[in-house]
Amino acid sequence: MKFNTKVRYGVRAMQEIALNDSPNGVFQKDIAKNQDISNRYLDHIIASLKAAGLISTLKGKKSGYILTRKPSDISLYDIYRAFESEMRIVDCLSTNQHCERNLSCAAQLIWHELNDLIINYLKNKSLENIIETYNQINQ
C-alpha cells in the first residue's frame, strides 16, 4: 500500500499552515517554497483541502491560508479523505467493486480487518501529532 503524492503533500501543506502563527495566514508561495512543492501542483492540493473544509483563506488583501480547526481536531484521516473518497488496501473492499468471491473469501476478512486498523490509526493521529514530531526533530 502506498499513499499518493497529493495525500503526502497535503499533510506537508497542513503542517506548514499549522506551524505558522502569522495573523495574515500562510501564503501559498511560502508553503511551496518551504515544502519544496511546485506552486502549480500546490494549487490542486490547496483546492482539495479547502473543499474538504480543512483550511480557509483569510478575508482581505494580502491574506493567506489558515486552519479551520485546531490541529488536535484534524486527523490524518481527515487529510487523507480530502484527496481520496475511501480507503481500501485491496480493490475488493471498494464500495463500488463487486467480487464474485465476496461471500466465500477468507482473505477478504483479513484485508478488511487490516484496512480498518489503518483507518483507525489515521483517525487517532492528528495534525498536532505531526507538529509535535516536527518540533522534536527540529529542536
Image (spheres, helix red, strand yellow):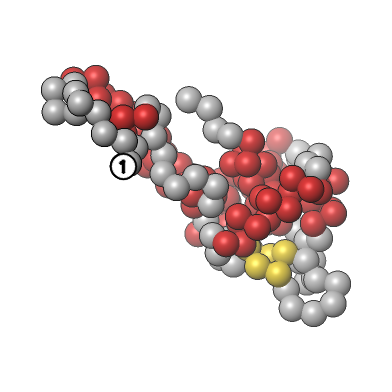
> Number of callouts in the render?
1
Residue 33 in sight in this render: yes
List x then y, in percent, for residue 131.
64, 47
Q: Which residue corresponds to the image point at 25% horizontal and 25% vertical from the top-left?
A: 108
Locate residue 19 relative to residue 120 in the image: left or right.
right
Would you place residue 138 above or below residue 85 in this image?
above
Residue at 75% across / 58% down in the picture?
20
Q: Nearer the viewer, residue 48 or 114?
A: 48
Let me know if residue 133 appears in the view. Answer: no
Residue 64 quadrant: bottom right
Q: Amino acid at mark 1?
A: Thr
Q: On screen, 59 above or below 103? A: below
Residue shown at the point (68%, 55%) measured from the top left: 46
x and y, in percent, of residue 63 in the image: 80, 71
Q: Secondary structure at mark 1?
A: loop
Locate residue 79, reporting x and y percent: 54, 49
Which residue, as the protein is rendered here, is positioned at the far left? 104
Residue 57 vertical placement versus 14 (above, below):
below
In which quadrant will I find the C terminus? top right
Between residues 93 and 28, which one lies in front from this camera angle?
Answer: 93
Residue positioned 66% across, 50% down in the render: 45
Observer-nearest of 102 and 25: 102
Pointer 1 residue? 95
Q: Residues within 10 Å of mark 1 (few under 14, many from 20)?
A: few
The quarter of the displayed image where residue 8 is located: top right
